[in-house]
Amino acid sequence: MSAINFPVRIALLDDHPLFRQGLRYVLQALPYVEAVDEAAEFPELLAICRQHLPDVLLLDLQMPGMDGPEVAKILLAEFPGLKIIVLSMFSADKFITQMLKLGARSYLPKDADQDQLRLALEDVLTTGHHVTPRMAQALLRGAPAGLAPGPALSALVQLTPREEEVLRLICEGRTAVEIADHLCISRRTVEGHRQNLLEKTHAPNSAGLVVYAVRHGLLNA
């Protein structure tokens, strides 16, 4: 059964009608999705958001006239609570890290299957973020080049052994469900540990936890 127990509104921004129609078909089959709004261009999407702000925006990275990063900057400045999931054909590290730094909650390839999309949506709606193994790899490769070496993690925060386990699994790109199964604990307990990690490290999100762990040498321990 889905973990989502409230009606969800989703918006799509993509300039390919067939792709939008396929997404709409998949999304409308989810029991918690109340409405799916489509836009082919940014002005159309902005009007949709101002009339009825969606819970989640599925955003194509390459759009005519205005690209994904520019769209994300403008929308998040006006609607900071908007949850953005990028759907893109581009998989290079620079695109992934750029969108995560701008505030995207997840980054999926356009060839992701229905289960991957559903899982990303449910993670984003319940925990705020969905970190895939590909996202984690991009962050791990990009963090050392963009961050000065930091002090040892133990010198900054005191993590319990269980919190360290959860952090390592987050850095591997595991979902909340996968972490719960791996550690034989409930998903609610995983989310509690994740929230504790965010508070202790002052990381803004799961992507921030990965960068924090790299910077402070936890993954090399």
Image: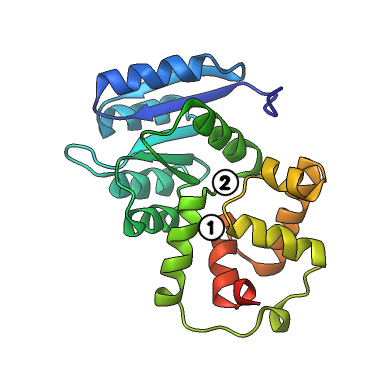
What residue lies at 46% left-to-right and 70% top-to-bottom? 143
What residue lies at 67% left-to-right and 27% top-to-bottom? 4
- Report the residue that reaches farthest toward the left: 65
User: Residue 7 occupies which quadrant of the picture?
Assistant: top right
Question: Residue 48 has which mark?
Answer: none
| Residue 69: x %, y % from top left | 31, 49
User: Residue 40 occupies which quadrant of the picture?
Assistant: top left
Q: Which residue is mark 1?
A: 207
What residue lies at 63% left-to-right and 55% top-to-bottom? 170
| Residue 199: x %, y % from top left | 71, 62
Circles 2, 1 touching at the beta carbon (< 8 Å): yes
Disc 1 residue type? Ala
Q: Quadrant of the N terminus?
A: top right
Provide the secondary structure element on which disc 1 rests. helix
| Residue 87: x %, y % from top left | 38, 38
Q: Quadrant of the C terminus?
A: bottom right
Disc 2 residue type? His
Q: Is residue 88 left or right of residue 49?
A: left
Mark 1, Cα crowd under 10 Å, few <14 / some 14-19 / many 20+, is many
Q: Is residue 116 left or right of residue 44?
A: right
Q: Is residue 55 visible?
A: no
Question: Residue 129 has which mark?
Answer: 2
Q: Earlier in the sequence, mark 2 or mark 1?
A: 2
Measure how far apart labels 2 and 1 are at the Cα level.
8 Å
- Up/down of 131 relative to 10, above or below: below
User: Residue 16 occupies which quadrant of the picture?
Assistant: top left
